[in-house]
Amino acid sequence: MLELIRPAVQGDGGDVQLASFEDGVVVVRFSGACIGCPSKSMTMTHGLEKTIREHVPEVRAVRAEN
């Protein structure tokens, strides 16, 4: 489902990739302009988490890799 939001993130000079998926928890890795971006939490909550959970009901949470 990341392919649905990646073009928007890449358009702003960043990127997001799947780091892992285990026990219903998706962990993503941000790179590029996303590092330190003040809008990253909004992208995470209103973009990634919403989209992933709509398409994959087994997902309980979406987190950014530390």
Image (tube, rainbow, N blue to C red):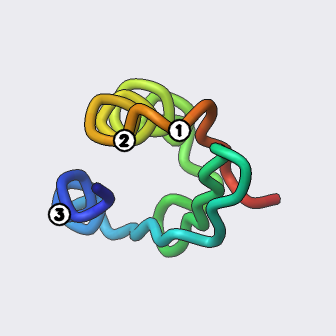
**For numbered disc 3, what is the local secondary structure?**
helix
CA–CA distance between discs 3 and 1? 22 Å
Q: Is residue 52 above or below residue 9?
A: above
Residue depicted at 26% across the width and 68% down the height: 10
Q: Amino acid at mark 2?
A: Val
Q: Position of residue 52 (x, y in %)?
A: 37, 41
Secondary structure type for disc 1: loop
Q: Are marks 2 and 1 in contact (CB under 8 Å)?
A: yes
In this rendering, position of residue 60 left or right of residue 32: right
| Vertical position of residue 32 compared to residue 40: above or below | below
Q: Which residue is mark 3?
A: 7
Looking at the picture, how far across and down is residue 17, in whole percent?
A: 47, 71
In which quadrant of the rendered view does residue 28 lie? bottom right
- Name the residue nearer the viewer: 54 or 47: 54
Q: Which residue is mark 1?
A: 59
| Residue that mark 2 sits on | 56
Residue visible at 27% across and 39% down in the picture: 55
